[in-house]
């Protein structure tokens, strides 16, 4: 098991010095090279009404509005056959039959069924959640080879994929993970993947300190005779750089990245590979189902359209969102189970051609730990001549951390606020004039140092023919429809009472939750608000409004006739419709954490007086 010297030896010139010179190789690419642009040619889809009996041949969409650029790649390969879709009848060529599934059964937790614990285990459960973020007590009772729940559309069972698909390297980055959730990830990949497609599983240990992840793990993976190998980083690099290390260490044609607490579901891999086999500039993303971290039952993704299809998105504060597949995209799809384009990915689970990932320079090496890398890769794919597809017939379960987890502290070398620094790097590299909307939503970030992005800007200039206006018009138009660009701010910062040390605080509430008061901490976050020229009082993508006598948050409504105003002289924050009675925010208590309420405005009432104090990230 080799120790990683990638950021202190061999790997350092690959990633860190890449910020100074690695893009120079790519400058040699001929922008007029006919081979590199051959993939711009459209191919006809052979469509057949799927209400009819029989087969219909459909490939992943190839007529994206982009697919130009100077990065060399095969692009569309007309020799790779398209998928054969059937509504029923014969199972698809990679689909396990019922007898095979029956043989997989192990008992507890099979088919994603819920498991429960007794009162005598409560202390152990709380301890495991605090340490790992999951209920490891229950996880340890479930077989590492349990049968997943089949959440797919039934029609997915009858799809034939190309017989010749590329081999994959599955890359799993981990740091101080619980044993059974980590190893169930590995077991599920091996159990649910056709042997001829699984070339290797590369486990990247990002400097774990837990004893069970040392010699015990090295010994355990020997059972797979080299199929699974562990690569250990000498020092903690963070999820983003560790993924790039995993890509560098991998050997097979396609990379598939998974988080360290997942379960691959039935026939998950062929649907991901088919679009890439046909076009090596496409990255594919599975549908990500939720696995409860307490009881380990499966649930489908929330949101989306009535078929459960949602694309990746963001609000203007750069928080990850999911929105329903836009209707214009739906109309282009002859089948509801066909892969569809998405402007962004969540970033933890995806497949990409290994050489293409290298050619687009992996991730920006200046991004630290996690945060923003999913958007950087998404923009790079679309704006540099590639694309991204979400694949409904590929599903992977993912366990989300539970409240009470202590978390993993970042490396000592990482400055404070790494996610916000990452956001600024991505925004300044890719958003062009649209960056102003990020700084409206995140005014505290405007002065935050984000390092040198010269190499990223130069790479984009030389290899990415599309700007952000094009991207938002052709690919990301659904984002602006769901999250309209915010008006400019009139006032922003913490809203501090002039009496005492209390600030308005959302307490992390959203969508109907109350705004309360808490001791001012000058860190922004839940205490940072914006009053804009549209007369909205906002936090992130949420608007504040009056509900009875109390202040609450909700998704902003364009039809709200009431508006906010603030008078810096009196310190009064009022809400109401024009030419009608207005109400002012007032403290309920000056000495304790409490709610605030709306009362009739009274300039002589000190409980109604507040200041907006700007808070800048450092």
Image (cartoon, rainbow, N blue to C red):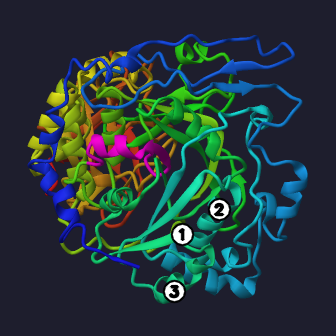
| Image marks 3 and 2: residues in contact by CB distance under 8 Å | no
Task: Return the residue at label 1.
Answer: 228
Badge 3: how crowded within 10 Å, few (<14), some, or many (20+)? some
Residue at image position (56%, 64%) is 261
Residue wearing tag 3: 212
Quadrant in the picture for residue 66: top left
Q: Which of marks 3 and 1 is in front?
A: 1
Please tell me whether mark 1 sits on a helix, a strand or a loop. strand
Q: What stretch is highlighted in magenta?
A: 346-363
**Label located before the other in sequence (1 or 2):** 2
Q: Residue at x 21, y 29 (%)?
A: 463
| Front residue of this view, candidates 242 and 209 | 242
Q: Is residue 475 above or below residue 328?
A: below
Label 2 Cα crowd, 10 Å radius (few <14 / some 14-19 / many 20+): many
Mark closest to the chain's N terminus, 3 or 2 = 2
Q: In this view, does 88 lie to the left or right of 511?
A: right
In terms of secondary structure, where does tag 3 sit? helix
Q: Quadrant of residue 558?
A: top left
Cα–Cα span, label 3 and label 2: 21 Å
In the displayed structure, does residue 166 sit left or right of residue 507?
Answer: right
């Amino acid at each position: 098991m080799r120790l990683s010297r990638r950021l202190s030896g061999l790997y350092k010139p690959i990633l860190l010095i890449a910020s100074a010179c690695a893009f120079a190789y790519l400058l040699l690419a001929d922008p007029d090279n006919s081979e590199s642009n051959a993939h711009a040619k459209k191919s006809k889809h052979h469509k057949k009404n799927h209400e009819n009996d029989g087969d219909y041949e459909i490939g992943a969409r190839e007529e994206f509005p982009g697919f130009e650029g100077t990065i060399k790649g095969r692009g569309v390969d007309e020799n790779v056959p398209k998928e054969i879709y059937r509504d029923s009848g014969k199972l698809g060529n990679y689909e396990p039959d019922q007898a095979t599934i029956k043989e997989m059964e192990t008992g507890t937790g099979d088919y994603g069924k819920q498991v429960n614990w007794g009162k005598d285990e409560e202390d152990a459960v709380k301890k495991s959640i605090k340490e790992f973020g999951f209920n490891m007590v229950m996880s340890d009772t479930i077989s590492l080879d349990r049968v997943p729940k089949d959440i797919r559309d039934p029609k997915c069972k009858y799809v034939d994929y190309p017989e010749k698909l590329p081999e994959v390297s599955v890359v799993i980055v981990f740091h101080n993970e619980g044993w059974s959730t980590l190893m169930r990830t590995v077991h599920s990949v091996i159990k649910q993947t056709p042997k001829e497609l699984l070339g290797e599983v590369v486990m990247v240990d990002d400097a774990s300190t837990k004893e069970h992840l040392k010699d015990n793990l090295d010994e355990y993976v020997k059972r797979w005779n080299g199929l699974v190998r562990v690569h250990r980083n000498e020092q903690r690099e963070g999820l983003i750089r560790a993924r790039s290390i995993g890509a560098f260490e991998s050997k097979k044609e396609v990379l598939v990245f998974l988080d360290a607490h997942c379960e691959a579901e039935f026939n998950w891999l062929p649907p991901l590979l088919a679009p890439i086999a046909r076009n090596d500039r496409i990255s594919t993303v599975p549908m990500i189902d939720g696995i409860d971290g307490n009881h380990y039952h499966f649930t489908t993704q929330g949101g989306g359209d009535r078929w459960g299809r949602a694309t990746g998105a963001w609000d203007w504060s750069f928080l990850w969102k999911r929105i329903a597949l836009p209707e214009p995209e739906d109309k282009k799809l002859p089948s509801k189970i066909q892969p569809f384009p998405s402007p962004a990915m969540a970033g933890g689970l995806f497949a990409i051609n290994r050489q293409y990932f290298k050619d687009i320079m992996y991730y920006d090496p200046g991004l630290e730990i996690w945060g923003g890398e999913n958007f950087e890769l998404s923009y790079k794919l679309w704006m540099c001549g590639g694309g991204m597809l979400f694949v409904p017939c590929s599903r992977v379960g993912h366990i989300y951390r539970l409240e009470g987890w202590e978390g993993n502290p970042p490396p000592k070398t990482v400055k404070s606020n790494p996610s916000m620094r990452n956001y600024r790097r991505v925004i300044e590299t890719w958003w062009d004039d649209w960056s102003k909307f990020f700084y409206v939503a995140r005014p505290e970030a405007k002065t935050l140092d984000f390092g040198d992005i010269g190499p990223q800007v130069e790479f984009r200039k030389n290899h990415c023919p599309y700007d952000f206006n094009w991207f938002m018009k052709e690919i990301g138009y659904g984002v602006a429809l769901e999250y309209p660009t915010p008006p400019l701010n009139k006032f922003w910062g913490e809203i501090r009472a002039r009496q005492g040390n209390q600030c308005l605080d959302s307490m992390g509430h959203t969508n109907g939750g109350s705004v309360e008061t808490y001791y001012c901490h000058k860190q922004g976050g839940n205490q940072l608000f914006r009053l804009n020229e549209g007369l909205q009082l906002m936090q992130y993508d949420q608007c504040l409004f009056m509900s009875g006598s109390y202040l609450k948050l909700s998704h902003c409504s364009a039809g709200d006739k009431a508006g906010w105003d603030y008078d810096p002289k009196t310190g009064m924050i009022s809400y109401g419709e024009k030419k009608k009675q207005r109400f002012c925010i007032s403290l309920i208590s000056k000495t304790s954490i409490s709610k605030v309420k709306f009362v009739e405005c009274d300039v002589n009432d000190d409980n109604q007086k507040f200041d907006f104090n700007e808070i800048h990230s450092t």
